[in-house]
Amino acid sequence: MSRTLRLAVIPGDGIGQEVVAEGLKVLSSALPADVKVETAEYDLGARRYHATGETLPDGVLEELKGADAILLGAIGDPSVPSGVLERGLLLKLRFAFDHHVNLRPGKLFPGVASPLAGNPDIDFVVVREGTEGPYVGNGGSLRTGTDQEIATEVSLNTAFGIERVVRDAFARAQARPRKKLTLVHKNNVLVHAGHLWKRIFDSVAAEYPEVTTDYLHVDAATIFFVTQPERFDVIVTDNLFGDILTDLAAAVTGGIGLAASGNINPTGAFPSMFEPVHGSAPDIAGQGKADPTATILSVAMLLGHLGYAAEAAKIEDAVAADLAERASLTAPRTTSQIGDALAARVAG
Amino acid sequence: MSRTLRLAVIPGDGIGQEVVAEGLKVLSSALPADVKVETAEYDLGARRYHATGETLPDGVLEELKGADAILLGAIGDPSVPSGVLERGLLLKLRFAFDHHVNLRPGKLFPGVASPLAGNPDIDFVVVREGTEGPYVGNGGSLRTGTDQEIATEVSLNTAFGIERVVRDAFARAQARPRKKLTLVHKNNVLVHAGHLWKRIFDSVAAEYPEVTTDYLHVDAATIFFVTQPERFDVIVTDNLFGDILTDLAAAVTGGIGLAASGNINPTGAFPSMFEPVHGSAPDIAGQGKADPTATILSVAMLLGHLGYAAEAAKIEDAVAADLAERASLTAPRTTSQIGDALAARVAG
Ligand SMILES: CC(C)[C@H](C(=O)O)[C@@H](O)C(=O)O
Ligand SMILES: CC(C)[C@H](C(=O)O)[C@@H](O)C(=O)O
């Protein structure tokens, strides 16, 4: 019986196109011959915005619903005012498809140099809430453009939204050898949102007696990310803190060239979306300089999410093996050379 | 002619008492004989809260207004619900006295080991806005304690509040050799607040043609803090991002045992307040284990702010000399031994 994987692909801006091409290359080489991949590519991002003014037309959103998963490259270009594509496309997808589990591993692979002295053992995963907090787009400005301007940003937090992501994080922690979960917030200042997070965290914790729990303010968490990253196993946190912490996590584990992510809707009501943590890097776009590894690891997450666990593991193993050898390479490889090397390893 | 320095002292909780004692010791030894120091100590923090329910009585707030400056140790104790002392005392002081410039140097002193490989050159200062943003305490919750709870946190940002801190930061950048100022925000998501910050930043920049400017999203900034901290000179940012970045800055420059800060009201309408960036560390309180250096460097900032530039420099030099020798010490020193050593250097 042949199976079909319907993949929606949004290469986006800058290096998005290049890294997504390599991601698809490795995806094909990882899948068994009887799995047919149907990709539908969507031209969204800066080019489309300039041509038509559209960021994410309703018709496209509707079509995307039919995909098994979405692979996204990167969004954002200096020619478009900051926020237009981020809010109108990337965040719109996360919110429309209720991607409440934004999953971002922070793992230092053997052979990869960390900017931290002593190359510590780092292997944690951040479960970032993806549909609430300061990302809801609830804000505005008054007397805009004048000396009397006032601007607000409202963070919205619901027991419903927090509980589902906290439950997901506890289940992940329970399934890992160390079984440790750290809640990160700032409940000594953002007392309303922070106490709501803490209350729900503590109440779900009671159902997971084997999971060791911990609470850190976000400022303190950044200290431990650089002084004691090995203390983390699973971290659950709000949308904005998760955004900040996962870039820092990428930095200490060898850079955003390696950081993968999944925007997951665990209910399956809408397709989940996988993307590298990095941005569109317009300064190096089109030069074959981008490292596609983050996208390729995101493809592994995508396959794992769709039930192709063995194929996902094959890709991760190939990446681990490739990374272990990178330090001994004499010349830098191009984007597609890295993709080719990984595709070959996966196939071989 | 003899001068008098009226100092209000709030040792606070945990290690606050110990580190403040050393700060005052070094302060006395730094000042010329004709300066009389009048200290008024205020018993505020967890003990007072448990005894009387008070965090910052109006009468005390009124008295504090008469001080030339405030020296604060640390606030917070596990026996008090998170947020009560922070909001009711520390933040209340910052807001009541309009401490809009929260100044936090990030400097790696020679001889101090950074957790970053290769011990990079780090010498920047963060100008954190201190009276707006998500710290205003404008939030609440509905259906509190139920499965239907909703909690909000509102970030308030005004052109007035942003412009004054941005101007302060430009003036500081202009006065430094590298003359570089980086704005950190998240204007691709928090578009209203972020664009207001950017608009004001760009408009003040036009008045400072010699200052090189730069913008980074907060998530990207954390990456550069660990991969390229030498790129920063002066950073200006909002209250919450500044909180997060300055803990990270402390971590990469040798730890919060060394991180000083000033909560400054440049108008002089109310006394400015100086405090170490670290917390009350109840786990090591009363054991002589706390490093008073952050408080002592905060005392140097306090003296500099009150016009005692030479005395401030003497303390900084003493700290630099002491830090350069620490690596060669065979046994750890107690809190008061470090204070004694620094007081002796300053005096000698
Ligand atoms: C591009 C931006 C909107 C996005 C975010 O803030 O979530 C990015 O930084 C990320 O982490 O995926
Ligand atoms: C204790 C807390 C309220 C405070 C803050 O968030 O500002 C602290 O973290 C700081 O940085 O001074």
Image: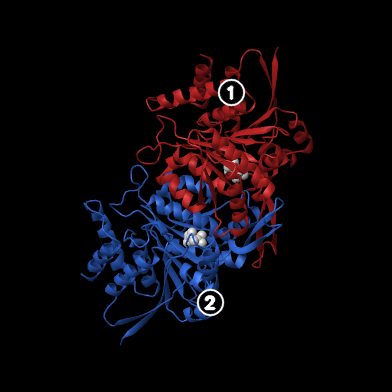
Chain colours: A red, B blue
Badge 2 marks a residue whose secondary structure is loop
Categorize mark 2 by other alpha carbons within 10 Å: few (<14), some (14-19), many (20+). few
Q: Is residue B334 left or right of residue A65?
A: left
Is ligand 2 within 8 Å of the beta carbon of the residue shown at mark 2? Answer: no
Q: Which residue is mark 1?
A: A309
x 23%, y 55%: residue: B325
Q: Is residue A226 above or below residue B24?
A: above
What is the count of numbered marks?
A: 2
Q: Is residue A99 visible?
A: yes
Q: Front-most of A283 and B66?
A: B66
What amino acid type is highlighted by mark number 1?
Ala
Which of the two marks, 1 or 2, is nearer to us in this view?
2
The picture quadrant where one finds residue B158 is bottom right
Residue B346 percent coordinates (x, y): 25, 68
Q: Which residue is mark 2?
A: B57
Q: Is residue B180 above or below residue A102?
A: below
Chain letter of disc 2 in the image: B
What amino acid type is highlighted by mark number 2?
Pro
Residue B2 percent coordinates (x, y): 31, 86
Residue A132 percent coordinates (x, y): 66, 48
Q: Is residue B201 above or below residue A27?
A: below
Chain letter of disc 1 in the image: A
Badge 1 marks a residue whose secondary structure is helix
The picture quadrant where one finds residue B38 is bottom left
Q: Is residue A235 left or right of residue B19?
A: right
